[in-house]
Image (tube, helix red, strand yellow):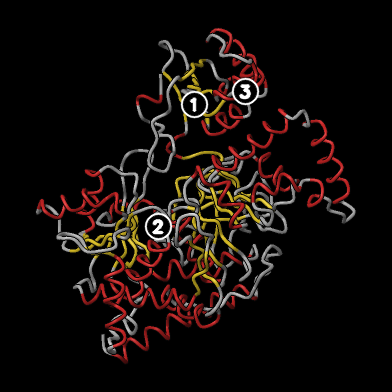
Amino acid sequence: MKRKEYIEMKEKEMAEALKTVETIKNSKDPSVKYRNSRPITDIKHMLETSCEEFADRPAFWVRKEKKKPFEPITYKEVLNDVNSLGTALIALGQKGRRIAVIGANSYRWAVSYLAAVCGTGVVVPLDKELSASELKQLVIESDTTCVLMAGKHRKDFVEMMKSGDTKLELLINMDADEDDADVRAFPAVLEKGRELLAQGDTSFTEAEIDGNVMQILLFTSGTTGISKGVMLSHRNIAEDLMIAPTVLEVTPDDIFFSVLPLHHTYECTCGFLMPLYKGASIAHCEGLKHIVNNLSEIRPTFFLGVPAIFEMLYKKIWTTVRKKGKEGTLRKAIKVNRITKKIGIDLSKILFKDITSVFGGRMDMIISGGAAINPEVLDCFRDFGINAVQGYGLTEAAPMGALNPDTAPNSSSIGRAFPNCELSISNPDENGIGEICIKGANIMLGYYNRPDLTAEVIKDGVFYTGDLGYIDDKGYAYITGRKKNVIITKNGKNVFPEELEYYLSNIDIVQESVVFGKDGAVGDDIVIAAYIKLDDEAVAEKYGEVPDDEKLIKYLWEEVDKINAENPLFKQIKQIKIKKDEFVKNSSKKIKRFEAENKF
């Protein structure tokens, strides 16, 4: 592209960014409280402007040596590392190529992602939980030529490269200190980039970024076993970064605790790029077994997670309280504080100090996404003095769909639409329930090499999510189920399995369940059945020992009968069975609903 054409293109992109910012400033939505988003055209522009504004502030907190405390890495140092690695990748022949990143959350993963996407080529984040054969298939499908990987994946990718079945030509080990015959070491590549920069190499620092073409290729880990490549642009991400922190506040003093895998767009956009955009900092959890220790060391203010994490912490808190015989006292304290908050006196920091200390003592915001969460869990954390909200998103929306405002959260809702982003319901029924649709500059370019699938979900610029729900008169959206999961009775009635699974999850000994429809006898209607996995700890706590199945089934039926009593006949659960082993899940730990082993 000629220089003049490039300048004109970037001016046009900036005009679009300014339009988004202006829309935010002029929004009439009362939930839009924070209107200081700065215009950005792409991720590289975001990073460079953040490094100008927050140069000497910490961008990451890392443990450089075992048993040593976490140390800061400044924005200035991050930009230097990204520029060095990007320059080296281009020198190694990767300009315009597909570059994969795989491994546990780490500073080097973050630098690798930014170096790949901010001027080198197309970044392809890969799921570290996939098998070698699955990874090979994705490498082939994406035409990946370079992989920056954690050491544990070295053998698999070396074999892939030597097989001749892929286009792989460069492997970089993020954990190695020295090069070997087949793989380059991350520090050596980084140092090579530093030398080139010192010699005046500007191939990366002056690289041209087209904000409207595919620069990120994400493979979804669906519950159907079919992985789709989602094509995202810089503009998609930039739009999300500008619109999201308008309904909840993010400041340079915030520290984000990164737990979810960075290859997922939820964590990548919201827990990685978002704090960098706002001048905040990031600390990576060193593994779920270290979560409590890391929280006490890092003392973060933001915690993004999935319901399973927060429900686990919720259950552990209450189990500990019961063991100490203080459940009644705690519930009374919660009740008192709810009353005093109504007159402007919040005693949570005093009353629940021991509980909030588990999160490091400074936690301000918990955001749950990825699946539906029990509203009681969010309400409980807010009772303890930690704001807790639910959001909604999909990879195809990079991932922003809706979010609860921090000043007016509704625990039962997935949230409200963002400014400059439309949320609507397609073909609502008599109850207002229909398919949730999103329209905005954050919607993907399409599915990689699948224009047919793209045409099914994007029509006239509107993305049809496949989720069913409704929007109330205050603008809050609610999900009732997944379109493809709906059980349709012979009388044409719709049963949303997710709704019944939610009711089952409130039974004290239930860990998770799958509700599905079975063919009844000839002439009979569909039978609603539930396969239930019990919570072994909860069972042991309740009974003091492991009772036989007959006793457990009897108790479950007592609870299911209560659920059935609140529902019409066509929605009532008629069969239940206890599942002894774990449900078959995808790498995101979501149950594969249609897997044969997950039904009976």
Q: Position of residue 198 (x, y in %)?
A: 31, 87
Which residue corresponds to the image point at 15% horizontal and 50% vertical from the top-left?
159
In the picture, residue 251 is in which quadrant? bottom right
Q: Position of residue 369 (x, y in %)?
A: 54, 49
Secondary element under disc 1, as helix, strand or loop, is strand
* Placement of 339 over or under 577, stated as above or below: below
Residue bearing the label numbered 3: 568
Q: Is residue 287 visible?
A: yes
Q: Judge the density around disc 3: few (<14), some (14-19), many (≥20) Cα neighbours within 10 Å.
A: few
Location of the C terminus by quadrant is top left
Q: Which amino acid does label 3 sit on?
A: Pro
Q: In this view, does 465 lie to the left or right of 543?
A: left
Location of the N terminus by quadrant is bottom left
- N-terminal-most mark, 3 or 2: 2
Residue bearing the label numbered 1: 515
* Placement of 547 over or under 199, stated as above or below: above
Instruction: Using the image as rendered, state which of residue 351 and residue 230 is in the foreground.
Output: 351
Residue bearing the label numbered 2: 459
